[in-house]
Image: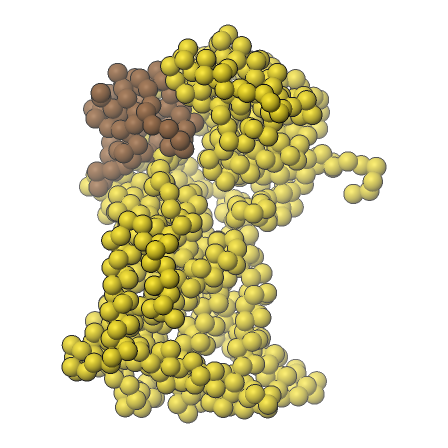
Amino acid sequence: MATLKDAAFGKEVKVKRIVGEGPVRRRLMDMGITKGCTIVVNKTAPLGDPLEVTVRGYELSLRKSEASLIEIE
Amino acid sequence: MDGGLKMRTIALAGNPNSGKTTVFNKLTGSSQRVGNWPGVTIDRKEGRIKGVEDTVLVDLPGIYSLSPYSPEEIVSRDYIVNEKPDLILNVVDASNLERNLYLTVQLLEMGTPVVMILNMMDLAAAKGISISAANLGRMLGCTVVETTASKGTGIDDVKKALATASKVEPIPQRFEPSVEDAIAKAEEGIRSDLRPELRRWAAIKVIERDEKASEYVREGFDAEPIIKALEDEYDDSSESIITDQRYNSICDTVSGCLNAPVDRNRETFSDKVDRYVTNKWLGLPIFVAVMYGVYYLAVQTIGTMGTDWVNDVFFGEWVLPAARDWLANAGVNEALSGFVVEGLIGGVGAVLGFLPQMLVMFLLLAILEEIGYMSRIAFVMDRIFRRFGLSGKSFIPVMVGMGCGVPGVMASRTIESDRDRRITAMTTTFIPCSAKLPIIALIAGALFGGSAAIALSSYLIGILCILMSGIILKKWKSFVGEPSPFIMELPPYHLPSVMNMVMSVLQRGWAFVKKAGTFILVACALVWVLSSFNWSLEMVDADASMLASIGNAIGFIFAPLGFGDWQFTVATVTGLLAKENVVGTLGVLFGFAEVSEAGEEFWTLLAGMITPLAGFSFLLFNLICAPCFAAIGAMHRELGTWKATAFGVGYQCLLAYAVSVIVYQFGLVALYGTVEPVGIIMAVIALAALVFLLIAKDPFGTIKSKVEAVTA
């Protein structure tokens, strides 16, 4: 299953679902990462983690471990 | 207020970075009062709105949602439910509409009338976003006012809207029919004594399986079948279904109020800046340069110059002599005069002397925060600090702590995760602050021929202690849990608002002054009395005082560390007042009335009294153990309770003891071939305990008693 962790930079991807449960999943969804929304991964931080993504028109940073919870189409 | 008039309370709510602070400052001006929310160390700000009679504006914490997962969100939610504000003023970033409306929708669910401030209209325009405020208000069922608060545009309209705001009935959001159906069914199970406007909200909470929802459900009602049926239909958890529904309704709202479609591929100013600032190659060098700039201004130049001036000129030349003369002229006896001048004014003055340095540091931190660079620091540094159980934001306090532990500890406030913030507040002072430099200079000069390796190793050991503590404290019961997520907005860069920064610096500075006037005052008085009187309450020199006899009595504790003589014990204790005292106290106890900062006068005496190894051990203990009272006061402010503060200080002292005993005892064996039977056993146990704590997955509960035995 492809996740946001593996998404190519600069390419728009569509969220299929978010796995896991509890605060992390809830925080991701509160920040606007929900089923069907589009995300672009812009880049990684200088040391390779975390990622910077654009979602719903703003910039969000999240770790690769959190990105791997987001399944994409 | 007199009985006839009821004050109207208005709650200010909004996302972080939505310009909420600017709006609050513009509306309330200087009428602000800052305290803490009950039970949590989150600022609670209140103020009167200029030009709107009989209203109190309560600033809720900046939040993204009302989920019950962070203290900020719980505080906000409890406030709205329990304190029933008359109106919610919701600040929304117009340039980031969808995510900001998520909170709006949740606020509307709670049934309190909402006036929306559509802020940052200038940024939105720059991004090519054009919103019809009238349509937005109609679709959500609330009044909408357009503002650009940073330029003051629209603030008068906000006041007008507040003055005239009649009760607007929020239009309940419409979710998909089967979800609405489930909500309606759950609403039947809500207790009848709940306020009517909260019934729909409570029903949604029940569907979300919110932990606190059970208190709204009447006895005997089981919502589980309703939730289960909904989850089966959507093949998802009920919490996610509701979140999806909210965002779907927001998308409909947004597309209904946008005047033109938005081009999301347009490159913004922030994108351009971030091409360099968070660049793969330039990100770290830029970060180092910015940090050096902060350090240079606060520690090397302006800040320290201000602090030296306050200490040497303001207190040293003006206040202290004036107070002494005044008391002498008033015929006050010498003991009382000494108590007031040296004990109280001198002690508190030593602490207040840090104020200029802290103000500079707070100003610089406020600028970094305001322009949006702070979150980039966390973004760049997260990878390194995560390895040790902390997050990218923990780096800033450590940096600041090299100058002074007090602003260092206070800088931990910028860390969102409660756990990381508390651990950082407890460990920041391990890095040698500028007041500890004289101790390093004394030991290096008197015992090591001025070797630079002593200073270098002090910093290395300090950093090592912080990183080790990150690993160890994460295993302690109140800190255990999932690693805190790092899901953080990178807000657009913007120019700092002068008013916001001045307010923030003054509020933080005042909090420190208040602390100096209470807690630190009492501590100073106590140490002065102990070091000036003997047990018959006769005024004596320090070496015959109660403190000296206490030093003699507890000196044995430090014997395994190589410095059991009472002078060193007393110097360590007075170091609690201010670490500068350590060298000065040793000077007094060795019979020198005045010593230079690094105590050159008694270097030879010291060298004859204690071995270099014991001296190094003394240095280590003083670097790592409890910081000065001012820093302990700052820790208390960040940690919230005396219990947590005592835990932090206790941990610092235990670690200091363990590190010193390991270095001294193993050093004895390695350098002199001497074995102290009791000491070496303690050192072995301390080392084993430390290694075990670092390696073991769940060391507490089982090893706890053993650790205490080692160091007791």
Give B49 or B560, whichever is nearer the viewer. Answer: B560
Q: Is residue A25 left or right of residue A52?
A: right
Q: Residue at x 52, y 53 (%)?
A: B640
Count numbered badges in the picture. Answer: 0
Relative vertical location of residue A67 with respect to residue B289 in this rendering, above or below: above
Q: Residue at x 49, y 91 (%)?
A: B544
Q: Colour of chain B?
A: yellow
Give B594 or B70, whichever is nearer the viewer. Answer: B70
User: Which chain is drawn using brown?
Assistant: A
Query: Which image quadrant: the N terminus of chain B?
Result: top right
Relative vertical location of residue A27 with respect to residue B621 in this rendering, above or below: above
> Does residue B444 appear anywhere in the picture?
no
Q: Quadrant of residue B582?
A: bottom left
Q: How is the image coloured?
A: by chain
Relative vertical location of residue A7 with respect to residue B674 in this rendering, above or below: above
Query: Which image quadrant: the C terminus of chain B?
Result: bottom left
Instruction: Name the spot of residue B637 as percent of width and height, x first.
Output: 51, 55
> Does residue B241 appear anywhere in the picture?
yes
Q: Quadrant of residue B705?
A: bottom left
Q: Quadrant of residue B90?
A: top right
Instruction: Name the spot of residue B72 as percent of width and height, x first.
Output: 51, 39
Q: Residue at x 83, y 40 (%)?
A: B3
Q: Residue at x 57, y 13 (%)?
A: B185
Give B335 or B134, whichever is nearer the viewer. Answer: B335
Instruction: Name the spot of residue A5 as percent of width and height, x first.
Output: 24, 28
Q: Is residue B131 left or right of residue B168?
A: left
Instruction: Name the spot of residue B608 as percent of width and height, x first.
Output: 27, 90
Relative vertical location of residue B248 with respect to residue B32 in this rendering, above or below: above
